[in-house]
Image (cartoon, helix red, strand yellow):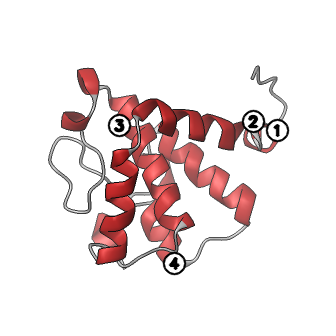
């Protein structure tokens, strides 16, 4: 379990991370304490992250939104593959496999995942896909 001192509140989460939190609750209707810990994990994007999340040094042009997108997708993967113990072998297996995929592929995966639930994510809005 991620220590609670490393949690953020949903209001502190960046746009893509907040979108992932909302998507998780739309799809699953609930989050276990371990899933919540991953979803609310606060990444300091200015320093290397001890749990393998992306920082500004990992992306072209140090794009903060891209870092948030990659971290949101990595959080999704960690939950999808069974919420492994932070820092354990399964955790690092997910992180390493995620980092091996091209950035465009990760962004496309998120786009299609969110497109499938766009009406629930953006109620009353017209979303052009």
Residue 122 got which mark?
2
The residue labelled by disc 1 is 119
- Assess disc 4: are there few (<14), some (14-19) or many (≥20) residues with their C-alpha within 10 Å of its C-alpha: few
Q: Nearer the viewer, residue 5 or 34?
A: 34
Q: State the CA–CA distance, disc 4 to disc 2.
A: 26 Å
Mark 1 or mark 3: whose residue is earlier in sequence: 3
Q: State the CA–CA distance, disc 3 to disc 2.
A: 22 Å
Residue 33 got which mark?
4
Identity of the residue drawn at 40% across and 36% down: 102
Q: State the CA–CA distance, disc 1 to disc 2.
A: 5 Å
Residue 67 got which mark?
3
Residue 42 higher or lower than 57, as above or below: below
At mark 3, the secondary structure is helix
Mark 1 or mark 4: whose residue is earlier in sequence: 4
Answer with left or right where residue 21 lies relative to residue 103: right
Residue 39 higher or lower than 104, as above or below: below
Mark 4 or mark 3: whose residue is earlier in sequence: 4
- Assess disc 1: are there few (<14), some (14-19) or many (≥20) residues with their C-alpha within 10 Å of its C-alpha: few
Q: State the CA–CA distance, disc 1 to disc 3.
A: 25 Å
Observer able to see residue 57: yes
Q: Nearer the viewer, residue 98 or 66?
A: 98
Q: Position of residue 33 (x, y in %)?
A: 51, 78
């Amino acid at each position: 379990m991620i220590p609670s001192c490393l949690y953020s509140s949903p209001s502190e989460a960046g746009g893509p991370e907040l979108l992932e939190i909302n998507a998780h609750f739309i799809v699953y209707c609930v989050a276990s304490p371990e899933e919540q810990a991953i979803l609310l994990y606060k990444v300091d994007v200015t320093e290397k992250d001890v749990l393998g999340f992306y920082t500004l040094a990992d992306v072209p042009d140090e794009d903060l939104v891209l870092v948030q997108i990659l971290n949101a997708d990595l959080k999704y993967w960690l939950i999808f593959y069974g919420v492994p113990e932070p820092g354990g072998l399964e955790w690092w297996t997910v992180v390493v496999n995620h980092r091996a995929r091209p950035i465009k592929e990760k962004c496309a995966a998120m786009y299609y995942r969110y497109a499938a639930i766009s009406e629930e994510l953006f109620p009353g809005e017209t979303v052009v896909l």
